[in-house]
Amino acid sequence: MGETDPIERVMDGRVWDEFCERMKATGHKVLAAAPDDPLDRAEGLRYVARLARGFLRDLVADAQPARVPFVPGEWLKIGLDNPDYVYFSAKLDAGGCYVLRGELADAARIGFGIYSGALGTPTGLVCDGYLDSEALSLDERGRFEIPIGRDEEPGKGLRMGPATNALNARITLLRRAEQRLPELELVRLDPAAKPPPLDPAAFSRGLDRVGLVLDGTVGQFLNWTKAFHAHRHAVVEIDPKLSAMAQGDPKTRYFYSYWEIGEDEAFVVDLEPPPCEYWNLQIGNHWLESFDFMSFRTHVNQETAVADQHGGVRVVIARRDPGVPNWLDTAGHARGGLALRWVGAEWIPQTTARVVRIGPELLA
């Protein structure tokens, strides 16, 4: 066997040693980019550990499409994951034929996307097809079916490409703690072969890929944080070069910022939402992970935000409660990222932002 033979690398343990060394190096890459703050640095290492756990599950432990159901999972906290979205995912076989069945239940909207590539790879995560609840045909019970395969008509089903490998769903719950999730079922219509025993060579390549994707994903989103920090306390549209490597809902326009405030300061964002299918504004940590949004109020959307008599919304990000509407709690953090999403907006409004002292100016 050659020096780079994957089975040989399993036999002598090199594949494991190299994976551990790569994960160690990725952790130090995060530490090198971390603010001089114990919380941020600890969260950075936890971020690497969370990503490693998720990638190990997806690329090694549950790597075969036939073995993974379409269920709500522990979604990776990456790129300011949306607190209003419940994410479902499943692996697909590009040659397979599927049908997705479900109901809307309490969801304000659902988006279904099929993807090729992956985060942290040279191509990034590429959207091969997308269908949202506006295009669904519901029966008398409010249920729908979406065919998925190589020959489906776009707009009525999801047409897979030659490299399609995943199905993801974004389910929007505007009051997530109170609402009921839709029931979704993914069924494969053509016969699938029984999964074979673990292939040592495939395992070796999978572990290599985890190390590469982990390092690539961390590097990709460190660039996001760097780009957001360059526009600190200003809300700007994301650079298309960044979003091209992590494609999501094609109807969404993404705007971002970075905030850094003292105990007696507030980051104030004023906006006037246009007619749209959905909007939200959220904050997260330096590593662009969402906060614990089930315990802290860290985002607002069109249903939860308090508007003034003219329809304007003032969002106040502060480390303590300033006693005004639309306060977002930084959950003990002094800095982090901000995301503003407009979905299906008729126009994009001007958004202004500034840092002020907590006091009368917040009411001005």
Image: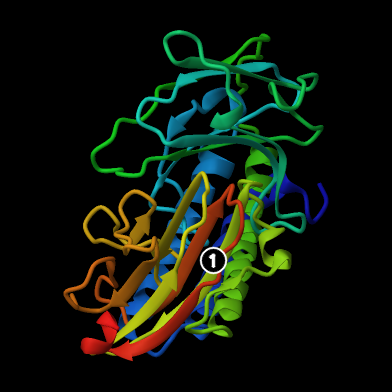
Q: Which one is nearer the viewer's eye here, 356 or 152?
A: 356
User: As shown in the figure, which amino acid type bears the numbered disc 1?
Assistant: Met
Q: Which quadrant would residue 285 be assigned to in this image?
A: bottom left
Q: Which one is nearer the viewer's eye here, 62 or 357?
A: 357
Does any portion of residue 67 appear in the rendered image?
Answer: yes
Does any portion of residue 14 appear in the rendered image?
Answer: no
- Residue at x-position 28% and y-position 78%: 318
Give the percent coordinates (x, y) of residue 183.
40, 22
Q: Which one is nearer the viewer's eye here, 274 or 242?
A: 274
Q: Is residue 265 left or right of residue 62?
A: left
- Would you name the residue on which mark 1 appears? 23
Give the percent coordinates (x, y) of residue 317.
32, 75
- Residue at x-position 42% and y-position 36%: 108
Q: Is residue 57 left or right of residue 197?
A: left
- Residue at x-position 35% and y-position 70%: 315
Give the percent coordinates (x, y) of residue 131.
63, 32
Q: Which quadrant would residue 50 be assigned to in this image?
A: bottom left
Give the percent coordinates (x, y) of residue 349.
56, 65
Position of 151 relative to 303 (above/below): above
Q: How is the image coloured?
A: rainbow
Position of 129 relative to 328 (above/below): above
Q: Is residue 337 left or right of residue 2?
A: left
Badge 1: how crowded within 10 Å, few (<14), some, or many (20+)?
many
For the C terminus, the quadrant is: bottom left
Element assignment for label 1: helix
Q: Which one is nearer the viewer's eye here, 36 or 100?
A: 100
- Residue at x-position 49% and y-position 25%: 69
Q: Is residue 318 left or right of residue 150?
A: left
